Image (cartoon, rainbow, N blue to C red):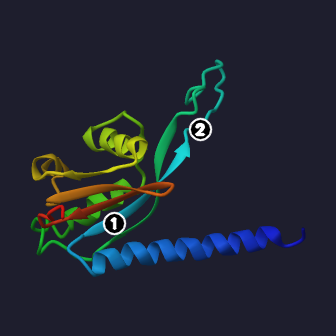
Amino acid sequence: MVGSGSADRSKEAVGMMALHEALRTVCLNSDWTYSVFWTIRPRPRVRGGNGCKVGDDNGSLMLMWEDGFCKGRVTTECLEEIEGEDPVRKAFSKMSIQLYNYGEGWVLGRLMGKVASDKCHKWLPTEWTDQFDSGIQTIAVIQAGHGLLQLGSCKIVSLI
């Protein structure tokens, strides 16, 4: 079929714009400071020169940043600016290059893998989020279709 690749790319672009708008709307209409959608993908299997491969034969999965939104200049709600730098936006930016493997990594990485496999949601208490050193008080991780929605707030957000 001629042109179907173009139509597929167009649908994908519309879907990405809709995802970004949804993430943006969540933050602008609530107490959430940032929102991120992580997709669940197979871990790449690559053969190296010595026959080693990344990923295993049982189809292990990873969580990969799909899109995110962070409110601008949130330092009045969170921590004070450090030399003109917004600590929340800095942490948010670092997340955009993060990959989470199921059950591996630091506390949030293991939790995200657990949420994905159990198809549930988790609310992280303040004592867990203090480690991010960005002023985030609440983190929610919610299983959403083919991925996870991660929300963070500079306020304590109650689970209703």
Residue 24 on image: x %, y %: 37, 76
For residue 100, above or below residue 145: above
> Residue drawn at (27%, 81%), measured in percent from left and top?
29
Q: Which of the pair 159/36 is nearer the observer?
A: 159
| Mark 1 residue type | Ser
Q: Quadrant of residue 96?
A: bottom left
Q: Secondary structure at mark 1?
A: strand
Quadrant in the picture for the N terminus = bottom right
Q: Secondary structure at mark 2?
A: loop
Discs 2, 1 touching: Cβ within 8 Å:
no
Q: Quadrant of residue 90?
A: bottom left
| Mark 2 residue type | Pro
144 lies left or right of 134: right
Residue 63 on image: x %, y %: 45, 47
For residue 89, above or below residue 106: below
Q: Which of the pair 51/121 is nearer the observer?
A: 121
Kindly identify which residue carries mark 2.
Answer: 44
Residue 10 on image: x %, y %: 68, 75
Circle 2 packing at 10 Å, graded few (<14), some (14-19), many (20+), is some
Disc number placed over residue 35 in the picture, else none: 1
